[in-house]
Structure formats: structure tokens, C-alpha cells
Amino acid sequence: MYIPLGLTFLLSFIVTKIVVSVAVRREESGFGLDNNSGAVQRMHSKPVPRIGGLAIFISMVFTALYGSAIHATWGSMYSALIMSVFFVFVGGLAEDLSGRVTPVVRMLFMMSAVVFTIYVLSSMNMIRNLEHETLNQFLRYEVIAFIITCFAVVGISNAYNMIDGYNGLSSFTAMVNLLGLLYIGFRLGDFNTMFSAAMLVAAIAGFFVFNYPFGKIFLGDGGSYTIGFLISLISLNLVGRHIGAISPFAVLLLVAYPFTETIFTIFRRKFIHKTRAMQPDCLHLHQLIFSRCFHEKMSLLQKNARVMPIAAIMMIPQTICAIIWYDNTIMILLSLLAYWIFYIYVYVMLIKFKTPLLFKWMAYFLTKKMYINTNLK
């Protein structure tokens, strides 16, 4: 396992380095760069390559080919994993390079990937068990199980895309999520989950070196959709292989931060601000952390790099709860409820310019190390 892990990290690192170097030399072309300087959600002072997903996908493909070449026991499983995400990656990368692929078309790519993975490769388990007799009766119908599974996978894939753009935020969130899956897989003796999660962590880590703290590259649609799709696939397969040994809501608790961010954003836009659900704005939780927790005189890069460590408060606690109570549905659901209450509390406080005390302490610790006066409210 150590050789493919090292190969995945190394190749991801090398490809990311190449992409960053080429982007610096060809900045005037704008090809594959985030050049939308007028976007309300933009948080970079200059164009940044948004094709980090290319490094992650290439490194994983190479590892799959290596596994097939040496006839590794994990070769066929891992190859199916990479094939399953191909349509998702292509759809996202096309948007990264052209900027002209509509959200509807991208969703069609993701739905096609779900169909391909379930019915052609047979490498994804559909949602069949929610530990409720009535709900499980409905999930016995193929069409209902497929629709719910498709909604969940597409939703999580979009969730990771929604938090991309701040240095290290989406990639770190994904690695925390995957380490949680890896640990639960270890507890259940599930090698496939452990291997898949470890390889994806290695691929993201090679990219992360350049993504944080200086934001030389970010995932883009191709990278964030790919990561979200693979996390969904690994999670559904883990639950499907161990019915009764793991709560089906444990994997939802692991993705609580991006999932909650997505659902809350849709609700906020549709019912509070009366705008389109996909209408960009600058009112995401991570954007409020950016604008509320640091002194306005700090540079864009300084503030950007400190969003992720503070946002980690919204990632790590529920991950710990998930790996402790992964087989206890009651505790998992209580943890989810507590997380949603905490999320709404934090969001409302930040909207009112009342930074929560824990966030103040984190911001002060981060900025004090750089000898910057935060002057927090």
C-alpha cells in the first residue's frame, strides 16, 4: 500500500507544480485561469489556475494503471473507482477551461456518471437502508432508490465545489472527511474503503502543498466535483457493505460542513433573499469568516489563508463524533442536530457582526503569530 500511496502523492505534486509553473509563464493567455475579477465570490488578487483537479485525476489514473500492470489485488477495484468518476471530471474540467458549461450540463454529466457507475460498472451501492422500516420499504423500489442516491451524490459533489476558492478550504475539508472514512473502514476491517480513501488523500495532499497557504492553484469544478463524487461513492459502498455495523447517517455526519453549507445556502437564497438558488453571492459562512474575523487592513492573501484554520472548527468536531459513534444511529442523529444548531448560531452571529468568542480566539491566535493587530469587534 505504501508504494501506490507514495506514487499518487508524488505524481500529484509534480503535475500541480507543472500546472502552476506554466500558468505563471502564460498568465496573459488566461487559459485555465480564474479571470473573473468582477465576480462577487472572488477572493484572489490575481488570476489563479483552477485546474488542480487535473493533477488529482492524473495521479489516481497512474496508480490504477500501476496496479493493473503488477496485477495487484486492489487493481480492478481501484480501476473501477477511477472509471466511475471520468464523466464527472470531464464535465468539470470543460467548465474550468472554457467557462461556458452551464450548471445544468454539468449536472447531466454527474447524473450520467451515477448511471454508469451503478448499472454498467456495478461499483456503487445505492441507498437502500435508512434504519427506518417505512423508509426502507420505499427504498426497495429501484426508481426511488436511484433518485435518492443520485440526489445525494450530485448534492455532495456540488457541496465541495461550493466551498472551493479559499486557500486550502475545500481540499482540507475533503482530507478530514476521507481520514474519517479511512478510520471507520479500519474499524470495520474494510480494505477497499481504507485503500480508496488513502489514495484520494495522497492525491489531494500533493495538490494541497500548492493550494495552501499561498493559493497558487485551486481545485476548480473538475477537482471539486471529482472529490465530492468519489467521497460519495466510497461512503455509499462502506455503508452498503456493512449494513447493521455502521449507521447510514455516519457518512452524512462526516460531510456535515459542505452538506449543511449547500442546503442552507439554497434555503437562504430561495426563501430569505428571494433569488435563484444558483445565484452567486458573498454570504457563505466561509466568506463571512473572511470579512468579519480579520482586520480590514490585512492583505487579501493574509486573510484568505486564515479562513481555513478557523473554518476547521466547523469540520473537526463532527468528524470526531462520527468515528466514535459510527455504529450508533441515535448519537449520530443527535450530533447532526447539534451541528446544525451550532452552524445556524455561528452564521447568525457573523451576519450581525458579533463574532463568536471561539472564532475571536482563533483569529487572534493566527494573527498574533504574524504580529498583526486584528482589532476584532
Image: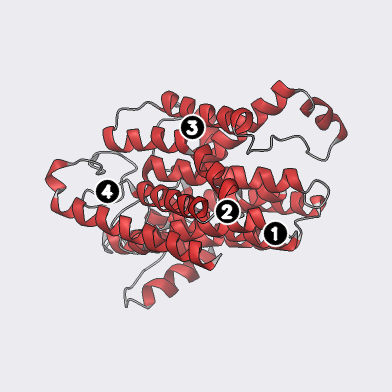
Frontmost residue, 65 versus 45: 65
Q: Which residue is drawn at 67% across and 49% down?
A: 251
Could you tell me if residue 344 is visible in this image? no
Judging by the rendered image, the residue that carries numbered circle 2 is 196
**Circle on res. 184:** 1
Q: Residue 70 carries which label?
A: none
Residues at badges 4 and 3 in contact (C-beta under 8 Å)?
A: no
Q: How far apart are marks 4 and 3 (CA)?
A: 29 Å
Q: Which residue, given by chain and number where applicable, does mark 3 sit on?
A: 269
How far apart are the two marked residues, 4 and 2, measured between alpha carbons? 27 Å
Residue 37 in which image quadrant: top left
Q: Which of marks 4 and 2 is nearer the N terminus?
A: 4
Question: Residue 372, percent across and down?
Answer: 31, 73
Disc 1 residue crowd, few under 14, some 14–19, many 20+, Cα 10 Å: many
| First in residue order: circle 1 vs circle 3 | 1
Q: Residue at x 46, y 41 (%)?
A: 225
Please indicate whether residue 289 sits to the left or right of residue 44 in the image: right
Q: Which of marks 1 and 4 is nearer the N terminus?
A: 4
Foreground disc of the pair 1, 2? 2
Residue type beneath disc 2 = Ser
On the rendered structure, is 114 left or right of 226?
right
How would you rate the neighbour count of disc 4 (Cα within 10 Å): few for under 14, some for 14-19, many for 20 or more?
Answer: many
Residue 49 got which mark?
4
Q: Earlier in the sequence, mark 2 or mark 3?
A: 2
Say if mark 1 contacts mark 4, CB within 8 Å. Answer: no
Question: What is the spatial separation of the Cα atoms under label 1 and label 3, in whole angstroms?
Answer: 35 Å
- Contact (CB < 8 A) between labels 4 and 2? no
The N terminus - image quarter: bottom right
Q: Where is residue 8 in the image (x, y as percent from the top left)?
A: 44, 59
Q: In the rendered image of this protein, does residue 62 appear above or below residue 273? A: below
> Earlier along the polypeptide chain: callout 4 or callout 3?
4
Q: Residue at x 41, y 45 (%)?
A: 223
